[in-house]
Image (cartoon, rainbow, N blue to C red):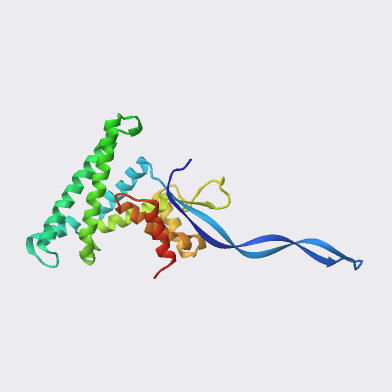
């Protein structure tokens, strides 16, 4: 049974065949009831499911983040830490106190992520660890999420400044990884139907190709679900605690813009 973070419904309009009864005269002129098949446009509800990532999923996503960060740095794109350090030394658009705080937060985040990665790699089968060890790993994950939240909160005042850093590009990449790997669907009325990946492909590159192919072909289900998936998964990735009500509000805000 696939564990899920959240699911929501979209209604996709499909052309389907429907059988109806009509009265028609036969060759003898006698009226009789016959069954006819017509093609009609009908709204089909689909359930879009965001799968709960496994530890392997989390590790693979983190690897993509690291690869993208490395590639960006090689191209000369500054990291947020580099940018914050630059402004803490020279001043400028970023207040010195905020710059110094960000430098500390980036350092704390790097340490927490490194420790979390080290602990999880050392203990592949976390489920079999003693309760105390599992709690320590969970605390590390929570600590990382809290630091990430504090960074996002502080950066929001300087969003334009950080939009083109290596970190932001890597974060966009990891969100895309989660969108393409955690998104599933099935007809909502078929509760026993097998969930299918929304994006086909055995590799990240394959799933990315599937994503852009659906976008270019204006796939109706993709158009209905992709924006919501990106918003929900971004919120999940940057938040420490996520309740169903938080996701419900995001869906409501998208469906009913003020």
Query: Looking at the image, which is closer to me, 222 or 129?
Result: 129
Measuring from the top left, give residue 86's x and y in whole percent.
Answer: 11, 60
Q: Residue at x 27, y 32 (%)?
A: 133
| 144 to the left or right of 89 | right
Where is residue 226, by image quadrant?
A: bottom left
Measuring from the top left, give residue 149's x and y in whole percent.
Answer: 25, 53
Measuring from the top left, give residue 214's x and y in whole percent.
Answer: 47, 60
Q: Residue at x 45, y 56 (%)?
A: 210
All told, the count of numbered labels is 0
Measuring from the top left, give residue 173's x and y in whole percent.
Answer: 32, 55
Establish if 245 lies above or below 141: below
Q: Farthest residue in the bottom direction?
A: 258
Q: Residue at x 24, y 49 (%)?
A: 146
Q: Farthest residue in the right direction?
A: 28
Q: Farthest residue in the front direction?
A: 245
Query: Looking at the image, which is closer to me, 117 or 4?
Result: 4
Q: Residue at x 27, y 43 (%)?
A: 141
| 101 to the left or right of 247 | left
| 221 to the left or right of 153 | right
| 77 to the left or right of 237 | left
Locate the C terminus and report the quarter of the image it occupies.
Answer: bottom left
């Amino acid at each position: 049974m696939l564990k899920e973070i959240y699911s929501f419904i979209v209604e996709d309009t499909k052309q389907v065949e429907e059988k109806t009864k009509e009265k028609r005269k036969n060759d003898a002129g006698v009226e009789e009831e016959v069954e006819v098949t017509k093609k009609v446009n009908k709204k089909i509800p689909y359930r879009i499911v965001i799968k709960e990532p496994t530890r392997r999923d989390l590790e693979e996503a983190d690897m993509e983040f690291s690869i993208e960060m490395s590639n960006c740095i090689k191209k000369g794109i500054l990291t947020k830490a580099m940018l914050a350090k630059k402004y803490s030394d020279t001043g400028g658009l970023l207040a010195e106190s905020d710059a110094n705080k960000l430098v500390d937060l980036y350092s704390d985040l790097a340490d927490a992520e490194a420790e979390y990665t080290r602990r999880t790699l050392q203990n592949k089968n976390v489920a079999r660890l003693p309760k105390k060890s599992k709690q320590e790993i969970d605390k590390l994950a929570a600590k990382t999420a809290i630091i990430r939240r504090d960074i996002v909160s502080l950066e929001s005042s300087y969003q334009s400044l950080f939009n083109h850093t290596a970190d932001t590009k890597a974060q966009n990449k990891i969100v895309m990884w989660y969108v393409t790997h955690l998104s599933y669907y099935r007809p909502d009325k078929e509760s026993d139907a097998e969930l299918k990946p929304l994006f086909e492909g055995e590799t990240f590159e394959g799933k990315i190709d599937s994503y852009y192919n659906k976008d270019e072909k204006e796939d109706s289900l993709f158009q209905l679900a992709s924006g919501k998936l990106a918003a929900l998964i971004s919120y999940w990735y940057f938040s420490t605690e996520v309740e169903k009500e938080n996701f419900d509000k995001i869906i409501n805000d998208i469906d009913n813009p003020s």
